[in-house]
Image (tube, rainbow, N blue to C red):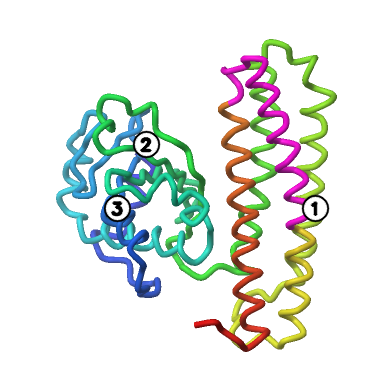
Amino acid sequence: METLNILNKFAGKRLDNFPAIQHNNLFKRIRDNFHFELFFKGNNMLFSPFYIPLRGEPFPELEGFLAQNEEFLDSLKDFIVNTLFVYSAVIEENANYLFNEQDILIGRLMYRDHLKFEVKFYSHYQDELQNAYNDKIYIGRIFIDLKKFEKDHLGLHEYFHSILDQNAKIQERALHKLRYYDEYKKPYLDEIDYLAKEVNCEAMERIKLIPKNDFKSAPTVALIETIDNLLHIQNLMVELKDFTVEFENKLRLGEETNYVKYLFKFSKDLINDIKYLSKLYYLISQKISKYSIL
């Protein structure tokens, strides 16, 4: 109910604190096929793009909220899709799961604090949504703050804090989900723990050197230094990602199916984050060069 209480604070009014963006066909399609998933009373409830409940039992407070907040929910959807476009590479990295007209995007809204949410995304096939919901594919996550759209330091600190949080979760779940925990702890889990903390520490120090905002007026020397810092962080991320994928493959061979899905989500987020760093590298490099192929 906490999520509902937070969303009710907007009293049905449209969010207007985000930029209008002209999207390409892929982003238009995911916006039109966007399905919200919200957590109420111990259950995840899924809604159609027109806010009709598809999974979970609606209750009076929820029905009243849906009836009075269609415009707000439309604007929230736009806020999320525009954040995906500007501050992530989730869609670009996972376009193969979203390109078909039958592909839909599910956004699971998870309350964090104040007006901040984590949004986890899943892809599914429209015709199989009702009968095989658990077959949905995890494709990534972003973080939003409904007070403001713009993110300091390109939103990078959120992703690198998340790496620490996710590392803690996979370490804890390994204790309960791995059949042969001792076999995997030293060569794999301990190394992931070390690499995740190293990436976080290095990234947070270098993010401080990146312009906080207003990249449009940042001096060229600051942009060049930003490129160097992004590439250094990316190299560390690739090392962590490669080692995590190696561990994931070993677990699959060992049929550790109860645990491997958690590691898959971790590696998927690392891959998305590396793609986002590459996206930033390209955009900043183009600004520095003052040359565009278009």
Crowdedness near tag 3: few (<14), some (14–19) or many (≥20) residues, C-alpha within 10 Å: some
Q: Which of the numbered marks, if any, corresponds to residue 8?
A: 3
Q: CA distance from mark 3 to mark 2?
A: 15 Å
Task: Tell me which amino acid carries mark 1.
Answer: Cys
Residue 204 image point, x, y percent: 75, 59
Task: Tell me which amino acid carries mark 2.
Answer: Phe
Residue drawn at x 40%, y 58% is: 80
Crowdedness near tag 1: few (<14), some (14–19) or many (≥20) residues, C-alpha within 10 Å: some
Q: Is residue 76 left or right of residue 190?
A: left
Q: Which of the numbered marks, if any, corresponds to residue 201?
A: 1
Crowdedness near tag 2: few (<14), some (14–19) or many (≥20) residues, C-alpha within 10 Å: some
Give SS at disc 2.
strand
Most common SS among magenta residues: helix
Seen in the picture, residue 141 relative to 230 is either above or below; the reply is: above
Residue 65 image point, x, y percent: 21, 48
The mark that comes first in sequence, 1 or 2, is: 2
Q: Is residue 105 left or right of residue 149?
A: left
Q: CA distance from mark 1 to mark 2?
A: 33 Å
Q: In the rendered structure, does residue 217 fall within the stretch colored magenta?
A: no
Seen in the picture, residue 179 relative to 213 is either above or below; the reply is: above
The label nearer to you, 3 versus 1, is 1
The quadrant in which the N terminus is found is top left
Q: Which residues are magenta?
A: 234-260
Q: Residue 45 sits in which quadrant?
A: top left
Residue drawn at x 44%, y 36% is: 137
Residue drawn at x 71%, y 88% is: 219
Circle 2 sits on which residue? Answer: 39
Residue 218 or residue 145, whichever sits in front: 218
Task: Tell me which amino acid carries mark 3.
Answer: Asn
Seen in the picture, residue 254 relative to 137 is either above or below; the reply is: above
The mark that comes first in sequence, 3 or 1, is: 3
Q: Residue 290 sits in which quadrant?
A: bottom right
